[in-house]
Each structure stands twice: as C-alpha cells, then as structure tokens.
Image: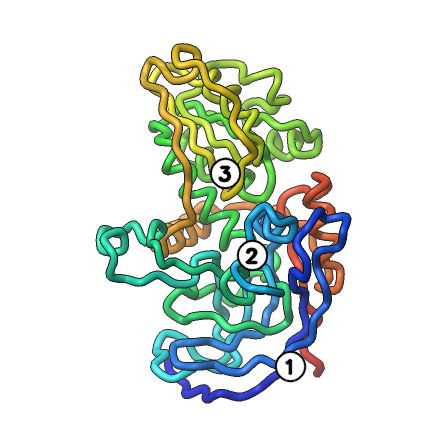
Amino acid sequence: MAAGGGAASRRLEGWAVAEPGPIGSGPLAAVRREISGPGPGELLVRVEACGVCRTDLHLAEGDLPPHRPATIPGHEIVGRVIAAGDAVTRFGPGDRVGGAWLRGTCGVCRHCRLGRENLCPSSVYTGWDADGGFADTTLLPADYAYPLPDGPDPAYLAPLLCAGIIGFRALRRSALPPGGRLGVYGFGASAHLAAQVALAEGATVHVLTRSAPARELALALGATSARDADDGPPEPLDAAILFAPTGDLVPVALAALDRGGTLAVAGIHLTDIPALGYRRHLFLERDLRSVTSNTRQDGQEFLVLAARIGIRVTVTPYPLDQAPRALADLAAGRVNGAAVLIPPPLPA
C-alpha cells in the first residue's frame, strides 16, 4: 500500500526532556509543537500507546547524554498511520504500526553487511536522536517500523517493541541451552517477557529480585523459584540475564553460573562493576556478554514468537499527561510489569 503524504503541518502535544537530572528535579516538560511531514520514507503516526522503558529514565536523568536538546522520549510506540510519505510501499493510512528503539542504520558498513546492524556506528535511535512516543503524534521511518495486528489492546503491544525485543536478544545472547537453567536478575518489563519465552522453550527459570510483587508475578508466570538476589538461586545456572542496571550484581550472577555458563547484561546503562576474581567469577569458561540494541530481524522473530506462544504482558497504564509520574514510579520500583502511556483519543 502506498500513499503520497506530502509535508503538512500538525500540532502535537507531549513531553520532552527539558533539563536532564534526577527524576525528583522534574526533567520532563510538557510541550506543544508543530510537526511537519511525513517526508519521503516516513510515516506520520497517531500514537495509541507508548511503553515507558528504563532507557527513557536513563535519558531523563542524564545517565545517557542527550543527542539533541529537548527530545521527546519513548520508543515502544503503537499507533495508526495518518499519512505515508513518498516512496513508502509497506504501509498506508489506517494501518497499525510499531516504532522501536532502532530507528536507522547506514546499511553499508561491515556490521550492517554481516547482519549485525545493531552495531552500526551510524545507528540512530527513537527518542534519543529523534522525537519519540511520549506524545500524541510522531514520525517514524517506514523501513524500521513493524506491522502490528489490529485486534489487541495497544497498551499490551507497546512493551513488546523494546522490552520484548531486547529481552529476546538478551536471552539469545545468554546462550541458554535447550532445557537449561536460567537466572533472571531484576524482573521488570523486559524480564517478565524474556522469562516467558524461556519457559515456553522448556527452560527452568529462577528469578532474583528485591521486589516482592515482582517475585509474585514471576511465580505466577511459571518460574521455579523467585528470591532476593542476595539469596542466590537454588541450583547452579547454565545462563543468566542481568536486567537490573546494577553493576554490583555482575559478580553475584557470575558466581551463580555453573561451568561453561554465560551472563548477558541487557541494559544500555550499568553502574560500575566491582573487581572480579578470575577463578571465582570467570574461570571454567564462564562468559560475560553485553547486549547492544537489536536488529530488525530480532524484532520480526520476537513478534512472531510472542503471538505464537501467547505471551502475557503485565501493564500499568498511565494517561499521557501523567508521564512524569510514570517515570517516577519506574525509578522507585513501583511499576509491576511495564508502564504504558495512553494518549487521549481523537475527538469524535
């Protein structure tokens, strides 16, 4: 489907990172802006829902340096196409689409050519290099958008677009063997989705988190155990994923691995890692891996898998005008599952 969009001007309402700083300092500011587009290859999208990711919190608090001033965060976007720009053939007006973290790559560097576009030095990101989904309207590059089904509640689709995709890549990076024992450190939006994939594929899952509600959710989803991280898992692990942005947990998780186990660190930001002891933490071929963004192939594979296994998404919805409270709740660990912003509906 194609539609020549032309460059029209519309007014959006949303939230931008005005002055990065501690969440208590109020780094978000309400904004009203003119939005022009769509340009060639772009989609003008009315946002139906946008997940609130820990990366948004890192951007707001300045853990990740801003790439441009007063950017609208948000990269778990579900919306309807208002108009499609020139050269767009995949989508047309009315289609439901998803916008994710990875927004663009060069397509010609060695990493892109090898299918590792997540490592492209020229990669750009939604809500960091361009305005994202903490708004009622946004622009998305059509080549990096995902087709989404019409039926599901958009609030339940939104977390799949980053929390789900990144959790899926982290699971694959953890090299979990078939029927293996997986440890999950931290149990928020991404972790509760990745754990379900592991369980569906026959793994034994042990969750390590300080949050009592998160432990309850983990057990309800099928985890074999749910404990505080300091207590450790009840058996050695074949693989582990660290979702909590806490470097102190790296040696803890490495020490819980069995021989030949792998720890994947899923976050874009992590506090400093304490000194590691070679024999205690890395000897016997234990591996420590990072996870960097995702490829579009990751996204496509995960969305198909999520639909097939009937993944359960636990969400805490917030009206768009309560975006600061959603970020504050995320920072304080008060969100069970995934926080999702819901813009007001279009006037009838």
N-terminal label among 2 and 3? 2
Q: Quadrant of residue 332?
A: top right
Q: Nearer the viewer, mark 2 or mark 3?
A: 2
Classify 10 Å Cα crowding around label 3: few (below 14), some (14-19), many (20 and above): many
Q: For mark 2, what is the residue?
A: 66
N-terminal label among 1 and 2? 1
Q: Amino acid at mark 1?
A: Arg
Q: For mark 1, what is the residue?
A: 11
Q: Secondary structure at mark 1?
A: strand
For the residues labelled 1 and 2, the Cα–Cα distance comes to 24 Å
Q: Secondary structure at mark 2?
A: loop
Determine the residue positioned at 43% across, 53% down: 303
Q: Secondary structure at mark 3?
A: helix
For the residues labelled 3 and 1, the Cα–Cα distance comes to 40 Å
Determine the residue positioned at 58% across, 62% down: 154
N-terminal label among 3 and 1? 1
Q: Nearer the viewer, residue 214 or 257?
A: 257
Q: Amino acid at mark 2?
A: Pro
Classify 10 Å Cα crowding around label 2: few (below 14), some (14-19), many (20 and above): some
Q: For mark 3, what is the residue?
A: 196
Q: Position of residue 164 (x, y in %)?
A: 49, 48
